[in-house]
Structure formats: C-alpha cells, structure tokens
C-alpha cells in the first residue's frame, strides 16, 4: 500500500506556541517533575549569574498565592525582555562552562508556561518592571520607581491550564539545591516556604563540596580522594571525589554542567582510570562532575554525555590520583577493593 502525505497539513510550531503546545518537550512533563523543572529553570538562570561573578546570592521563595519568587543581587548580562520573549537554541552558551542549563531556554520557557510573570530589575537608581501573561507582554517594560543598588526579581505563577499540579514539594526542591551547592561551592542560596502559618527558610552553601555528596552516599570521608583539574583538551574542568564503598555498596553518580547525566564519556573515563590501577572489580563510591564550555549530549532525552576528549582526560586524571595515593600510602593500596 502506498501512502501519500499532504505537506500542507503539517503544522510547524515555533516559539511560544511550540512550548505551550508541547510543554513536556521543554520541562519533561506536566506533572510534579515538570513543575519543579520550571522552577529550576528560573533558579538556575539566577545561579548562573552568581557562578559567573555577576551576583553574590540567590533567594527562592514559595509564596502563599502559588507563585514563586526568584531573586539575585545582580543584573542579567543579556537584556531581560529578550530572555523572556526570544526562544534560544539547544546547546548555545550563556557565558561559560559553569552555565547550569542544557539549553538557552530557561526564562523563555518559564514565561511561556506561567499564567502570570512579573520581572523587575534594579540598577542606576531605577526599578524597571515587565509584566506578562502566558508569555505575552501585558505592557512594555517601564520604570516602576526608585531603587537602591542592583538586583533582579522574577515572580511567576505556573499555569494551571498546563500543569496537573501547581503545588511544589519543598523537600524535593531542597534536595536539588543542596546538590547544586555541593557541586558549585561559590553558590549561596536560600529557599523560603511562605505557604504556611510560619515561613520556613533554609540556606544552601557547601564548604566541603563533593566530599559532602560522597558522605551522603555512605562513603567514608577519611578515605576520600579528590581530583580537581582544568584541561583545555576537553574544553573544561573536572572535579571528582572517590572513596571505598561503604555499607550502602558501590555507587557512581555523574554530572555534566551540574546536571545529573548518568552515562557518557565522563563515566567511561572514570571507569578506565580506576581499572588501570585497581582492576575492574574495584568497589568504589564516587561523584564525577565535569563542566564544559560546549557540552554535547546524546540519546533521546539527552541523557548521555558525548564529548569524546572527556573520556581520556578523566581517565588520565583518575589514574594519576590513584597511583599517587598508592605510592604515598602502600599500606592502603588495597583499601578501595576491601569492601
């Protein structure tokens, strides 16, 4: 049987229409996962400014009316109205390897999937305000009064017509923010839940970094090896913490640009380095984090890191660290396989 197709029946969705028609393609789902990803897009856009040195702290608040307020004490490098109304492209850079998001889509998607969004920027003594409804401007950007210092605030309310639930799980948000703080030790952020009778505020800042994540996986912190290296061959940096597996058994958790990516060249490189020194049966718990200028992702859900040079660079760094540990502490050479 021969099928014919009428090209005129194909509908190409672009920009705002595309995001609202297929929200799962941009935030993962229309359930709680997608709702939380919407908040992360807004929060991580602010965190980028801290990681790139343009702001010092981030504050996230869950408000009583169901809205979320995300604020930082800097001013965005790109015009805010452009970020809110122009759809970016996958893989584009937002200013450096510490960028958290995979896409240059964050605030556009937040705006498109909120029934109301208000953005305010404070600089040069003036507060400038922008207001949107479902991604469309209600009024052009306009001065809204005087201002002291600098700062940017995004307040948005997820669209009930899009999401199956608009109730945020504070504990799930706290878990992700705790993880982000450990992966990025310069971050200073707070989460306030103002939905109850008494506001609850928690601050996330990590001094121990990956050691903290490793301890939470059950590893012995006294046996931890930490590798930190900048490597131009892979176009980025790596930070790796590893230790003998604890009572919870061996675990390897991997990140690329602060996103959980559980497969790819960073994981392959880690295993190569361990095998070269300890053999294939080493029982380790590890956290592997790479931050790349131009990350490349593969798989239907972009869940696999594809940057080829990363494998050799990570393998070399891990092998050298383990060899150094073995040479300096020959009596502990077998420790990573002892459990």
Image (spheres, rainbow, N blue to C red):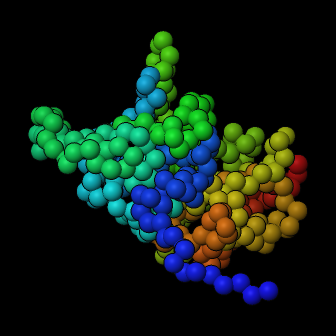
Estimate the x, y position of residue 279 in percent, counting from the top left: 85, 68
Q: Residue at x 80, y 69 (%)?
A: 275
Q: Is 188 located above or below residue 237 in the figure? A: above
Q: Report the side of 247 relative to 73 (left or right).
A: right
Residue 296 rendering spot, x and y as whole percentages = 56, 72
Identify the residue at the far bottom of this view: 2
What residue occupies the far top of the structure in this picture? 197
Q: Viewer-proximal residue, 220 or 47? A: 47
Residue 231 visible in the current orientation: no
Q: In this view, does 164 lie to the left or right of 74?
A: right
Q: Is residue 307 visible?
A: yes
323 shown above or below 139: below
**Quarter containing the N terminus:** bottom right
Decide if residue 308 is on the left or right side of residue 195. right
> Residue at image x 50%, y 16%?
196
Location of residue 189 with respect to 96 vertically, above or below: above
* Residue 126 place in picture, x, y as percent: 13, 40
Residue in the image at 74% along x and 55% along y: 252
């Amino acid at each position: 049987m021969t099928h014919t197709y009428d090209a005129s029946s194909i509908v190409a969705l672009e920009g705002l229409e595309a995001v609202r028609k297929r929200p799962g393609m941009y935030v993962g789902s229309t359930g709680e996962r997608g709702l939380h990803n919407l908040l992360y897009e807004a929060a991580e856009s602010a965190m980028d400014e801290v990681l790139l040195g343009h702001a010092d702290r981030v504050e996230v608040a869950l408000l009583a009316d169901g809205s979320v307020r995300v604020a930082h004490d800097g001013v965005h490098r790109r015009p805010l109205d452009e970020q809110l109304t122009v759809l970016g492209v996958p893989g584009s850079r937002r200013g450096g390897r510490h960028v958290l998001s995979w896409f240059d889509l964050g605030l556009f998607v937040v705006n498109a999937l909120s029934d109301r969004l208000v953005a305010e920027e404070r600089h040069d003594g003036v507060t400038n305000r922008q207001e949107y409804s479902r991604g469309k401007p209600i009024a052009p950007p306009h001065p809204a009064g005087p201002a002291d210092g600098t700062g940017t605030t995004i307040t948005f309310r997820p669209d009930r017509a899009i999401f199956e639930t608009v109730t945020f799980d504070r504990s799930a948000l706290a878990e992700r923010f705790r993880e982000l703080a450990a992966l990025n030790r310069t971050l200073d952020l707070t989460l306030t839940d103002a939905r109850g009778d008494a506001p609850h505020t928690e601050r996330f800042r990590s001094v121990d970094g990956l050691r903290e994540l490793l301890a939470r996986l059950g590893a012995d912190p006294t046996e931890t090896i930490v590798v930190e290296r900048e490597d131009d061959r892979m176009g980025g940096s790596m930070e790796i913490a590893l230790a003998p597996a604890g009572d919870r058994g061996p675990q390897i958790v991997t990140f690329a640009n602060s996103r959980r990516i559980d497969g790819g060249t960073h994981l392959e490189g880690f295993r190569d380095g361990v095998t070269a020194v300890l053999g294939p049966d080493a029982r380790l718990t590890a956290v592997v984090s790479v931050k790349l200028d131009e990350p490349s992702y593969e798989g239907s859900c972009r869940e696999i890191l594809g940057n080829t040079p990363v494998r050799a660079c990570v393998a070399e760094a891990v092998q050298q660290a383990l060899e150094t540990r073995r040479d300096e502490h020959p009596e502990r050479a077998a420790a990573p396989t002892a459990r």
